[in-house]
Amino acid sequence: MTSARSSSRAAGGSGPVRRAVRGLGRALHLPFTGTARGIRKATHAHGAGESGLGKLIELHAVNGAGDVMITIALASTVFFSVPTDEARGRVALYLGITMAPFTILAPVIGPLLDRLPHGRRAAMAASMLARALLAIVLSGAVISGGVQLYPAALGVLVASKAYGVVRSAVVPRLLPPRFSLVKANSRVTLGGLLATGVAAPVGAGLQILGPRWPLYGAFVIFISGMVLCFQLPHKVDSAKGEGKALLAADEQHLHGPRKETTKQKRPGLRTVGPAVTHALFVNASQRCLSGFLIFFLAFLLREHPMPGQSAAVSLSIVGISAGAGNALGTAVGAWLKSRAPEIIIVTVVAAVLGVAITATLFFSAALTACLAAVAGFAQALSKLSLDALIQRDVPEEVRNSAFARSETLLQMAWVVGGAIGIALPLNGALGLGVAAAIVGTGWLTTVRGLLAAARHGGQGRSRVA
């Protein structure tokens, strides 16, 4: 009897303790679970959760966070750790060894992935695993400065581009009801930008601990991304009705599928139409401008920082301006989804050209930051408008292939712009004049064709459908 009462008192006394421990556990756990629930609610809104688009948004956020970790580690090794003249040589060597082979491999990625239409989840998971393992290789290279730095960096670029191509092909398969492709791409891109903004200061903090730590962080992030790839819906691997697309706009290629009753084989290549090719060219000039500004301003501001600011602060101001402009353009893209994409491209690129000319004539730090912001805004809206044109004018069965090939061309344009930025003398007015020339070339050679396409909107679709 006495032992029973003692057991009862002990149990009663331990109850409040258990409740207190559980309460403390919930309090410590709430910031993480609450944040996770908030993110899940935002990414799965408006039917994105049911269609699977929400999972792709989260996967792309993980991809962006991992890429920025590797970028921070490589930037500290190749750029910030040596004097300016030596840094230019190192970056040029880095681009020569990694980007030159990449420009050869990039055109192959799209057609190669076209042959694997039923393994898109596995392809994205493989790109994540490859970057995770290469991050470990790079963690040794950033300390020793060994030659493995360059082939490992090339592998990261190729894997990242392979992911991007497959992701572009996956988005049309996950569209929620009443969602346009431009709106879906806007959400996915914005998720990646927000994750990059969150991961960048975390990566910088890990960099303080040592150059290896951001790469360890990238390893963990990419492994989690590999797991997320297989949580995408099975319909991602469906390739029903898909074909290949030819990026051409000449009249002789404007044809549709031939009748199956004829003895001739069904053609494998079809045009994407003149509006898409004009938009692709002006987008290439925008991507070329992006690569140019990144490398030219990185060296210019390191040698000649903004008045009263250090080189790191100056670079941060320009980088934040460009990132904010890009994020704003991505957010505005959904609001402009019902407008003519050709008019959007013509308008925003004209604004960039005007700002670039003004910054050339009245060169200053403020105008440089303004150019970076406007260029980021225009690049985001131009890319979303290109996506909308592909959605409108390219038949569904060849649309995914068109996305793959356009992404490859845009990446190659970025490489060309970066090479020009490294080779150019560190003269601010001269550099911004070159930037204006890049934008002007893309805009002036396409504005007439884009306006003509806007007047006959949708004609290309009827001709190729």
Image (cartoon, rainbow, N blue to C red):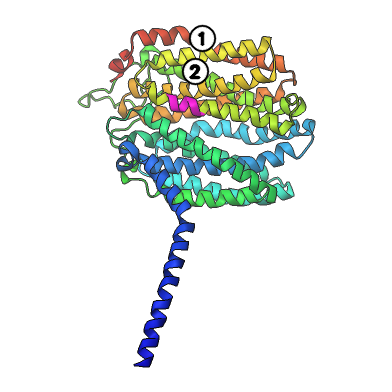
Label 2: state its secondary structure: helix
Q: Residues within 10 Å of mark 2 (few under 14, many from 20)?
A: many
The residue that label 1 is drawn on is: 445
Q: Which residue is drawn at the image coordinates 77% and 27% (left, top)?
A: 303
Q: Which is nearer the eye, 13 or 313?
A: 13
Q: Are dots 1 and 2 in contact, CB under 8 Å?
A: yes
Depicted 227 relative to depicted 95: above or below: below
Depicted 267 relative to depicted 51: above or below: above
Residue 64, given in percent of the width and then of the height, sits at 52, 40
Q: Is residue 403 within the magenta segment? A: no
Depicted 72 relative to depicted 310: above or below: below
Q: Quadrant of residue 198?
A: top right
Q: Which residue is drawn at the image coordinates 55% and 15% (left, top)?
A: 352
Residue 453, given in percent of the width and then of the height, sits at 38, 10
Count up the numbered dots: 2
Q: Quadrant of residue 278?
A: top left
Q: Is residue 200 visible?
A: yes
Work out which quarter of the rendered image holds the C terminus and state it.
top left
Name the disc covering residue 281, or none.
Answer: 2
- The residue segment tinted magenta is 327-332
Residue 186, given in percent of the width and then of the height, sits at 42, 30
Name the disc covering residue 371, or none.
Answer: none
Q: Is residue 159 visible?
A: no
Q: Which is nearer the eye, 287 or 16?
A: 16
The secondary structure making up most of the magenta span is helix
Q: Quadrant of residue 147?
A: top right
Depicted 221 relative to depicted 375: above or below: below
Please indicate whether residue 283 sits to the left or right of residue 433 in the image.
left
Sequence-wise, which precedes: disc 1 or disc 2? Answer: 2
